[in-house]
Image (cartoon, rainbow, N blue to C red):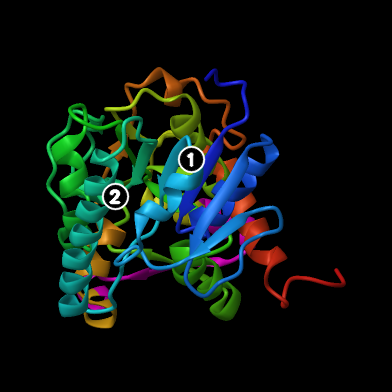
Amino acid sequence: MSATQKKHIFVLGSSGFIGRAVISSLQSRGHRISALIRRSTAPDGVETLTGDIRDFDWRRLEKDLPDAIIHLARISGRRKLSRWIAGHQGRMASKRLLRWLHTLDRPPHLVFTSGTLVYGDCGKAAIDETAPLRPIAFQRDYIRAEHPVLEVIGKSLPVSVVRPPWVIGGASWFRQFYFENAGRDGTVMQFGSGENLMSLVHVDDCAGQICEVALRGEPGRIYNISACPAITQSLFVQKVAEHMEAGIGVLPVEELRRKYGKAVLEALTFSLDAVSREPLIRDYPNRYPDATSAIGAAIADCRGSDSRFSGSS
């Protein structure tokens, strides 16, 4: 099947921050979409099956086998023990899915979404898909769900892994740690020295690249999602503050640890310049190819979904 033909894509995690953008991107391309949902409702035009990746009977898909499965669903936990349990459950869920794929004569392309926290703190060096894995923060536990996929990638099944960096938009970490604080206190917080590098991608470009991998990517590869050249956290904070006409504050590392814990500290201060050696990613026509435009769009997204910034001007 050529890339121009309409395909059937099955999405796991369709109600999440990136999942909603993936659905929108697939719909704009005219592809047929189905999704596994637990309690949420799917957008118009999306066919649904109800279930949970921990115990879903994958044989239910065999009557109408998709061309690709985009896996964005993550079992998560709020604290260290619950994250450890979530990682174990994620690993078992991945193994169940892979066992089912092994039973098929022509299994769909599985695109598993991970994250660049698996590379750890890499300083100023540019890191591509060949880098060793040194997971930090939440990925110390969540990478367990990725391990079974990595064991078969490039071998027995058509599997790919995508690793987004910091994804900015109207939800998730950006809203919590930057937008809401600036809207409440008039201050954008810098965490620690601000010297760490941040690789950014707007959620729409992230979703578009994930869809490209599912629709046109070569199975058996790892793809670092990449859009904006990396910038320091201090420059990132400065750009957010300029867009929001806010001041800048600094939260020292020890206070950040006391307030949010070690995992959040590591996530907010690790340094990574994530790049891709894959032409499919490097040549993707990103809508927001630089930090300034991506940050501006993310703030507009937040304002559009926040009653304090909507309505009359």
Observer-nearest of 97 and 13:
97
Q: Which residue is mark 2?
A: 195
Q: Which residue is mark 1?
A: 66
Q: Residue at x 46, y 41 (%)?
A: 65
Compared with 138, 228 (above or below) is: above
- Badge 2 element: loop
| Residue 86 is at least partly visible in this image | yes
> Among all residues in the image, which is located at the extreme front?
63
Q: Position of residue 179 (x, y in %)?
A: 55, 67
| Residue 296 is at least partly visible in this image | no
Q: Position of residue 204 (x, y in %)?
A: 58, 45
State which quarter of the image contains the C terminus. bottom right
The stretch of residues the image draws in magenta is: 239-256
Under mark 2, the amino acid is: Glu
User: For residue 70, what is the image quadrant?
Assistant: top left
User: For residue 218, what is the image quadrant?
Assistant: top left
Q: Position of residue 184 (x, y in %)?
A: 57, 80
Q: Residue at x 71, y 64 (%)?
A: 304
